[in-house]
């Protein structure tokens, strides 16, 4: 017998409900379970959230801290941090119609909520700013990367747009500033197999095996000791462009992870040294309207100032 579909709990302040399932017996109360399995918040924090009605059952009813905890039970809660840092800079809306929103985000803004960034995430900011509770991202770019991100407005068209990215039918152009290597023959296509680092969850690495990533790299301009590069990723692996540039011997300026980790995950951002990587343009044929779409970021990388 199939399990009933998860109810669509409404967002709060632009934040969708997160879900955690109770895997087995062993916790007498809902508070005991949450404090044990989700220790990023203290027991007192969970108590306060339960008292405020911010933890719900599958029907959307608030749960009391002393409510019994049952195996298979699903609990819903809304993420948020009292001390969340404010955004360094606001996003810009590049395009909006009944089907799509395209935003131009600054460095250090995550696309979706995660860790200590919830209200600061692009998705939550746009849901609140535009009043679009069902808005959902069609793809991701790194928190450290600036530039274009596309969102579906209507839930029933989301898969049609996401299918374009899965089928690699979206043309993506990035710009990066990195050291100038005159001996490096460009343009070229770099292919490799990328996998998570087994010791550091927040970085990836190149490993032996069949390639699962591909990037076309060309030199657009020489800027003294550095150069402006145009990058066209075919695939969309985590940190792909950063790793491929590092593998070519030209790591992107401001990269805090490659070739070596300068700041661990969770450390404060260095706003004076943003990653010099920009998602410059997106182009595709719209699967809903049939129109050719092309969007371009209005941002300029800081390293290009004066050139």
Image (cartoon, rainbow, N blue to C red):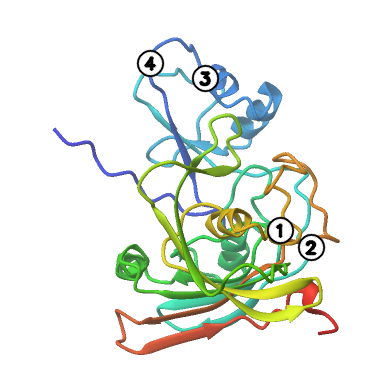
Q: Residue 12: in sight, yes or no?
A: yes
Q: Nearer the viewer, mark 2 or mark 1?
A: 1
Pick the residue in front: 274 or 59.
Answer: 274
Q: Secondary structure at mark 4?
A: loop
**Label 4 with label 1: CB-CB less than 8 Å:** no
Image point 69% across, 47% down: which residue? 257
Residue 145 percent location from the top left of the image: 65, 63
- Closer to the N terminus: mark 2 or mark 3? 3
Of the two numbered discs 3 and 1 on the same chain, state the one appearing first in sequence: 3
Q: Residues within 10 Å of mark 2 (few under 14, many from 20)?
A: few
Eyeballing the image, is 299 above or below 258?
below
Q: Which residue is mark 1?
A: 108
Alpha carbon distance from label 4 to label 1: 38 Å
Q: Nearer the viewer, residue 104 or 237?
A: 237
Pair 3/1: label in front: 1
Q: Which residue is mark 3?
A: 33
Question: Badge 4, how many Cα within 10 Å: few under 14, some, many 20+?
Answer: few
State whether residue 89 is above or below residue 86.
below
Label 1, secondary structure: give it: loop
Mark 4 or mark 3: which comes first in sequence? 4
Residue toward you, 162 or 9: 162
To which residue does mark 4 refer?
24
Residue 216 picture location, percent across and down: 48, 70
The residue identified by callout 2 is 88
Residues at discs 4 and 3 in contact (Cβ within 8 Å): no
How far apart, in angstroms, are the residues tagged by discs 2 and 3? 36 Å
Are the two marked residues, 2 and 1, in contact with CB atoms closer than 8 angstroms? yes
Q: Quadrant of residue 302?
A: bottom right
Q: Earlier in the sequence, mark 4 or mark 2?
A: 4
């Amino acid at each position: 017998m199939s399990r009933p579909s998860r109810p669509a709990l409404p967002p709060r302040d632009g934040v969708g409900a997160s879900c955690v399932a109770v895997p087995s017996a062993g916790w007498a109360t809902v508070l005991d379970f949450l404090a044990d399995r989700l220790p990023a918040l203290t027991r007192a924090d969970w108590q306060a959230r339960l008292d405020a009605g911010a933890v719900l059952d599958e029907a959307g009813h608030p749960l009391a801290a002393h409510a019994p905890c049952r195996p298979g039970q699903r609990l819903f809660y809304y993420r948020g941090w009292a001390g969340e840092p404010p955004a360094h800079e606001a996003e810009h809306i590049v395009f909006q119609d009944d089907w799509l929103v395209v935003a131009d985000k600054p460095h250090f803004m995550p696309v979706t909520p995660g860790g200590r960034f919830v209200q600061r995430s692009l998705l939550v900011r746009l849901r609140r700013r535009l009043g679009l509770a069902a808005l959902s991202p069609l793809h991701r770019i790194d928190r450290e990367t600036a530039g274009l991100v596309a969102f579906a407005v209507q839930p029933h068209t989301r898969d049609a747009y996401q299918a374009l990215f899965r089928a690699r039918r979206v043309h993506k152009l990035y710009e990066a500033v990195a050291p100038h290597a005159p001996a490096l023959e460009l343009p070229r296509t770099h292919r490799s197999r990328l996998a998570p680092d087994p010791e550091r969850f927040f970085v990836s690495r190149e490993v032996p095996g069949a390639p699962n990533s591909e990037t076309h790299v060309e030199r657009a301009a020489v800027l003294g000791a550095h150069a402006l590069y145009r990058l066209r990723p075919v695939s969309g692996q985590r940190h792909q462009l950063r790793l491929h540039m590092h593998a070519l011997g030209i790591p992107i300026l401001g990269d805090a992870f490659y070739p070596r980790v300068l700041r661990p995950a969770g450390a404060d951002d260095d706003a004076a040294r943003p990653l010099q990587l920009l998602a410059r343009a997106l182009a595709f044929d719209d699967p809903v309207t049939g129109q050719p779409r092309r969007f371009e970021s209005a941002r300029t990388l800081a390293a290009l100032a004066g050139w």
